[in-house]
Amino acid sequence: MTSHVNLAQQVLERVRAEAGPGADAEVTIEDITLGLTRFANSFIHQSVEDTSALVRLRLHLDGRTASGSTTVGDSAGLAALVSRTVAAARLCPPDPLWPGLAGPAPMTVGSEADPAIAAATPADRAARVRAFVDAAGGLQTAGYCSTMLWMLTFANSAGQVAEASTADAVLDGIARDLGADGSTRLSTRRLSELDGAVLGARAAAKARAGVDPVELPPGRYEVVLEPTAVLDLVKNMGVFGFNGKAVHERRSFVELGQAQLDPAITIVDDPVAADAAALPFDFEGTPRRRLTLVDRGVCVALPHDRRSAARAGTTSTGHAVPGGAVWGPFAPNMALLASANGASRPAEVDGPAADAAVADLVASVGRGLLVTDNWYTRVLDPRTLVLTGLTRNGVWLIENGEVTRPVQNLRFTQSYPQALAPGAVLGVGSHAVPVPFGWGSMRAPALRLASWNFTGNASG
C-alpha cells in the first residue's frame, strides 16, 4: 500500500488556506483492500475485490464543529471536501464541549500485516472454500472467505501524524443436514492459520448432531455458552456498557470500582496483542494500549475518546471512532480472558482444543443447555442491559455431564450483567476463540453460567 501522509497534509494545507490558521482540523484516510469469496449450495457464486480510500475531515472553526468525507482523492475532490466542511462548520450550532486535538505522541508499534494476506488471490480464498465444502462430506454448505488489508493514515493541525496497517483473514461457514445448521467461524491475522478443512468438518459434525431436535419448555436453565455465544455478551457489554459517554449520561450498567461481575471474569481491550487485527492509534490520532476494563469482577476502567474523557476529567484511552460524538467511544478488541493462564491463547480456533474446553465445562453440568450462538439480539433496557434474542446453529440438552439430544431454538430475555454477576459464573473455558468485529477482532472462551432466562420456544 502507498503512504497517504502527503495526501493528508495537502488537506490540512487547504484548510489553512480557506479557514485560516485558527481552525482545528484532523484528517483520517482509510485505505481498504477487500477480497471476498461467497458460497451457497456448496458452490462459489461470487468473488469480488475492492480497493477504496475514504478521506474524512473534522474541523473546529470559531467554536463550531463539522465533519465531511469523500472517496474522490484528486485535487478537485479534496478542494470540494474542504469547502463544504468549512461551510458546514459556519452553519453548525456552537460546540462548547470541543476537547481540542491530540498532540504529537509516540506510538506502540504493532506486528506487521501478513504479506500472504496482502497478496491473497481469488484462488487462495477458493482453495479454502473448497476444503470447507469437501470436509462437510456432502452436506449443503454456505458462507464466505475474505481477506482484508487496512491502512489508516492520520494527521492534524496540532502536529500529530501517524500511519499503520493491519490485515485480517476470515472464514465463516454453515453446514446443513435435514434442516439442522452447524456453523464455524475464524478471524486470524495469518492466512496460513485459515484451515477450511478443520472448519468444514466441525460445522458438519455440529449439523449432524442437531438433527431431529426436541422442544423444551421456556424457563431458567443452567447453560454452557460456546465462545461464539459469549462474544455476543462481550460485544453488547462493550457497545452499551463499557462506553465513557454512556456512563456519563447514566445509560450504562457500569459502576467503576464496584464488583458487579463474578471474580472469574476479567475483560481487557488489547489492540496491540499479537493476534489483534488492530491499529496502534485511534481516529483522533491518540496512541492505543492494553486497557483492563474488568479485573476479577470489578469494573476498573472505561474506554474514552477525547470528548468523553474531557467530560469525565480524565484522558483519552485511544478509543475514538467515526461518529463518536453521537455514539461514544468503543473498544473493538475486547477479550474475555480464558481461565488457563489469565490470557487469551492464540487461535487454534474451532478445533480440538476449543472443543475440549467446552467439553470440560459440560462435564460438570447436571442438567442444562449447550448453546452455540446468540442471534438477532436486541437491547430492551440499556441501563440494565436486558436483551432479547434467539439461539442459533445448535442447542443441545446436557444431562449428568453429557450432551444427550438436540433442542429446538429458544428465545431468551436476559440481563447480560446479571448472567455474569458474582456467583453466577460456574466455569470459564481454557481456550479463547477470535472472531472478526468491525475495526478489530474480539476473543472469548466458553462460559458455564448458573442461569439463563429462556422466555419462548418453537410453540410460542
Image (cartoon, rainbow, N blue to C red):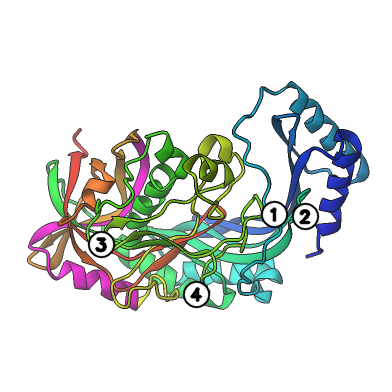
How far, Cα to Cα, is label 1 from label 4?
43 Å
Read off the residue under disc 3. 447
Q: Secondary structure at mark 2?
A: loop
Read off the residue under disc 1. 103
Task: Name the amino acid, label 3.
Answer: Leu
Residues at discs 1 and 2 in contact (Cβ within 8 Å): yes
Q: Position of residue 393 (x, y in %)?
A: 33, 54
What crowding class fits label 1: few (fewer than 14 Cα within 10 Å), some (14-19), or many (20 or more)?
some
Q: Which callout, 1 or 3, points at the residue further toward the start of the chain?
A: 1
Mark 1 vs mark 3: in front: 1
Q: Which callout, 3 or 2, points at the residue further toward the start of the chain?
A: 2
Tell me the magenta residue range. Answer: 353-379
Mark 2 vs mark 4: in front: 2
The outermost residue toward the front is: 313
Read off the residue under disc 4. 195
Q: Secondary structure at mark 4?
A: loop
Residues at discs 1 and 4 in contact (Cβ within 8 Å): no
Read off the residue under disc 2. 159
Task: Name the amino acid, label 2.
Answer: Gly
